[in-house]
Amino acid sequence: MNVSPSDPGARHSFGEFAKRVALVAAVGMALLLLTMATQVFLVVFTAILVAVLVRSLSGWLTGRTPLSERWAVAVVLLGMVALLAGLIALTAPSLTAQVEEMRKTIPTSVERLQKQMERYEWGRATVDTAENAAENADEYLPEPESLARRVAGIFSTTFGALGAVLVVLFLGICMAIEPRTYRDGLLRLVPTPRRARAGKVIEEVRAVLARWLLSISMSMTVVGLLTGIGLWLLGIPMVFALALLAFVFAFIPNIGPIIAAAPAVLVALTISPTKALHVALLYIGIQTVESYFVTPLIERKTVSLPPALTVAVQLVLGLLTGLLGVILAAPLTAAGMVLVRRIYVEDALGDRFPDQERDEAKAKSSDS
């Protein structure tokens, strides 16, 4: 039976279909905008970390010198630039040589590892699986024109990353120079009766981020020094480059040490499998010392993060935003814990933590 377009039932069915299509399109657009907004938020949050670092150093300086806040910020920024320039001037030649040597050494280590694995049944199966995957990937290699476009895309991505770094530095410096302007502007969005409470929460978030930066800086330094000393005692080449990798990747809890250990083990494998085992044990030992001795000792004076919660946040942000989310998972967890604790648990649910009860008791005693 044919249905006329003028039939009310047909118009109703078409209208329902159009509404569903519009709803799906709206949800898709909302998810796209949310993803873009999340990326922008992570960039802004990185700038906030830069501002907190600069303000923490300048605050320490103003407390011990007659410098004003603006001059202290200027001195800190100039000191950072001078320190970075000095490190580059002193270490760039040797670091460049070691990185180039590492680039030539690691492929040899991979070949040696492949030969070692082929001695065993499970190793041969793993190698065959990897080779089959590589052969299948060769079938989908792009044509030269497409390859050229991809190379151009890599360059544009690189310049995009450099642009993001410049944006982060610019925003961070602006926030460090005039923090009250941005703080007051944020408080304007809060209803007047809640502004005092919001101001305390913002200050607590800033303090927690400052303590976290202190904690992670000390942890990174310990890991870098222990790695450099351990590799030097083991007689591993390219000590400075590998120790620098360990120092940098220590910024990423849980995942960073694993990434930093991989090139060190591959470099040691060019000497002997025994050396590679020693290096692996060295990194495991350093991670154990850092996790169970150094970090708890530092966190007594700084900020404590539940490891399972940090890993969960890393997994979620890694799926949603990629590498940047994984890198910023720890400070975001620290800030998020403060917000959940103060805004949701205390204000919304009316619960009280021991430290809040202690502060309220102090306030009452001071009033009386």
Image (cartoon, rainbow, N blue to C red):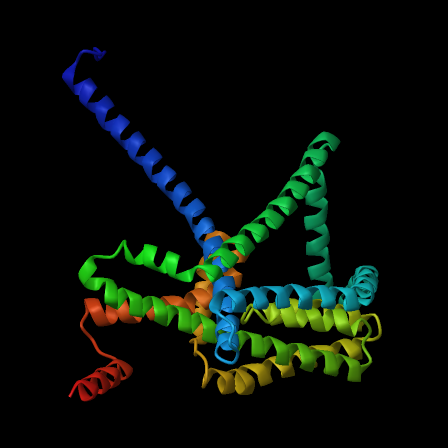
Q: Residue at x 41, y 73 (%)?
A: 207
The percent coordinates of residue 168 (x first, y second) are: 53, 54
Position of 69 relative to 9 (above/below) = below
- In this rendering, the count of numbered labels is 0
Q: Residue at x 79, y 81 (%)?
A: 232
Residue 227, by quadrant, is: bottom right
Residue 264, by quadrant, is: bottom right
The percent coordinates of residue 348 (x first, y second) are: 20, 66
The answer to whether residue 328 of the structure is visible from this angle is no
Position of 110 relative to 363 (above/below) = above
Position of 294 relative to 51 (above/below) = below
Residue 147, by quadrant, is: top right
Q: Residue at x 24, y 67 (%)?
A: 196
Q: Residue furthest front?
A: 66
The answer to whether residue 195 of the structure is visible from this angle is yes
Locate residue 247 relative to residue 99 in the image: left or right: left
Q: Is residue 297 or residue 273 the one in the foreground? A: 297
**Where's the N terminus, which quadrant?**
top left
The percent coordinates of residue 17 (x first, y second) are: 26, 27
**Where's the C terminus, which quadrant?**
bottom left
Locate residue 146 relative to residue 271 in the image: left or right: left
Q: Residue at x 81, y 66 (%)?
A: 98
The percent coordinates of residue 61 (x first, y second) are: 53, 76
Q: Is residue 251 or residue 64 the one in the foreground? A: 64
